[in-house]
């Protein structure tokens, strides 16, 4: 589960937001940013006047909060705890007791759903879209064949796109949908389509890029792109290829499970070792040797 997703402001909030806070909140949701609303829900003593105060915090601790809780020296600690709640994708009720009074705060984590873009609508894409939707991902499926990229094949997908791979990926970028909440899986029917799609998204700030293929094929693809197109070899370190975690998968649904397992493992900081690790380490070692000889 991805935890709470963006939605209406909780009824736990006990007063109207200021226009500045509301404007910043709506802007963050439009930009698909995860943000937490922090509300003083109860207080006494010298804090009594703060009930109903709101502010917003983001994961970036260098980004200043918008709004004022009015809690004085207590505020930095509250904002720190709010950011932790947001990072852990959880709503939280927090309580603080100081000599001057008691404060209760509600943190609502408005977390954008992770977005999985499946490039290729073949036999692996069908179970992968279903599994990803079950795991609370927003799913987009893309293929250049309308008979495959059809909503009837992907009832759990939010969007099914039929069109040229690179052109449609560029449109998704223009729509702001290739961001750090986006995971891309390249499982097209042909070697060249995977490579073209990889080149289209390689420089985007994505959470994950995975590409299907054997170790032999992946090594050949990366070497070819370095030599013929002069791409910085380090750029391929972020590509998970071969895709997935080794669970001995063979059938399409089993392969879909190993792909989704890798995505969740990355998202949650799990201990499983991706299939791509060996190739990544080989390439890094080769660059290190080349640097040492230079």
Image: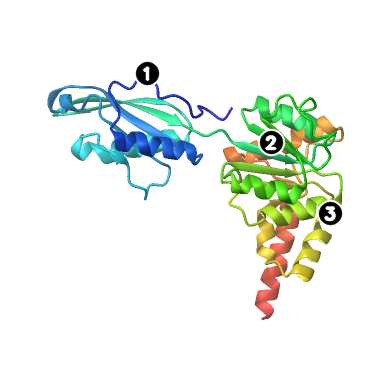
SS under mark 1: loop
Tell me the residue that label 1 is attached to: 11
Tell me the residue that label 3 is attached to: 192
**For the residues marked 3 and 2, what is the alpha-carbon distance in whole angstroms?**
21 Å
Q: Which comes before the other along the chain, label 1 or label 2?
A: 1
User: Which residue occupies 79% across, 43% down?
Assistant: 187
**For the residues marked 1 and 3, what is the alpha-carbon distance in whole angstroms?**
51 Å
Q: Which comes before the other along the chain, label 1 or label 3?
A: 1
Image quarter in which the C terminus is found: bottom right
Circles 1, 3 touching at the beta carbon (< 8 Å): no
Q: Position of residue 227 (x, y in %)?
A: 78, 70
Tell me the residue that label 2 is attached to: 140
Image quarter in which the N terminus is found: top right
Image position of 137 with respect to 64: above or below? above
Q: Position of residue 195 (x, y in %)?
A: 78, 55
User: Which residue occupies 30% across, 34% down?
Assistant: 19
Q: Residues within 10 Å of mark 2 (few under 14, many from 20)?
A: many
Circles 3, 2 touching at the beta carbon (< 8 Å): no
**For the residues marked 1 and 2, what is the alpha-carbon distance in whole angstroms?**
32 Å
Choose between 265 and 7: the one closer to the eye: 7
Label annotation for residue 102 = none
SS under mark 3: helix
User: Which residue occupies 83% across, 49% down?
Assistant: 213
Choose between 239 and 261: the one closer to the eye: 239
Q: Which comes before the other along the chain, label 3 or label 2?
A: 2
Choose between 84 and 199: the one closer to the eye: 199
């Amino acid at each position: 589960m991805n935890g709470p997703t963006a939605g209406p402001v909780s009824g736990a909030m006990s007063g109207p937001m200021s226009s500045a806070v509301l404007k910043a909140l709506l802007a963050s949701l439009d930009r698909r940013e995860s943000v937490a609303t922090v509300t003083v829900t109860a207080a006494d003593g010298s804090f009594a006047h703060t009930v109903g105060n709101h502010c917003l915090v983001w994961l970036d601790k260098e980004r200043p909060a918008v709004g004022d809780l009015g809690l004085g020296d207590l505020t930095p600690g509250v904002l720190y705890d709010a950011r932790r709640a947001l990072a852990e994708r959880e709503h939280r009720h927090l309580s603080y007791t100081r000599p001057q009074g008691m404060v209760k705060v509600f943190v609502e984590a408005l977390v954008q759903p992770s977005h999985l873009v499946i490039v290729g609508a073949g036999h692996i894409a069908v179970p992968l879209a279903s599994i990803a939707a079950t795991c609370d991902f927003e799913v987009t499926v893309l293929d250049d064949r309308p008979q495959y990229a059809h909503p009837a094949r992907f009832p759990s997908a939010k969007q099914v796109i039929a069109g040229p791979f690179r052109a449609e990926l560029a449109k998704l970028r223009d729509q702001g949908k290739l961001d750090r909440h986006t995971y891309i899986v390249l499982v097209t029917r042909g070697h060249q389509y995977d490579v073209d799609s990889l080149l289209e998204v390689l420089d985007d700030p994505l959470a994950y890029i995975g590409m299907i293929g054997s170790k032999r094929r992946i090594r050949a693809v990366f070497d070819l792109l370095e030599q013929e197109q002069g791409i910085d070899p380090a750029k391929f370190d972020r590509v998970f290829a071969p895709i997935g975690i080794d669970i001995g998968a063979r059938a399409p649904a089993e392969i879909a499970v190993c792909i989704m397992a890798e995505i969740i493992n990355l998202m949650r900081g799990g201990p499983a070792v991706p299939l791509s690790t060996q190739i990544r380490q080989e390439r890094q070692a080769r660059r290190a040797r080349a640097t040492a000889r230079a």
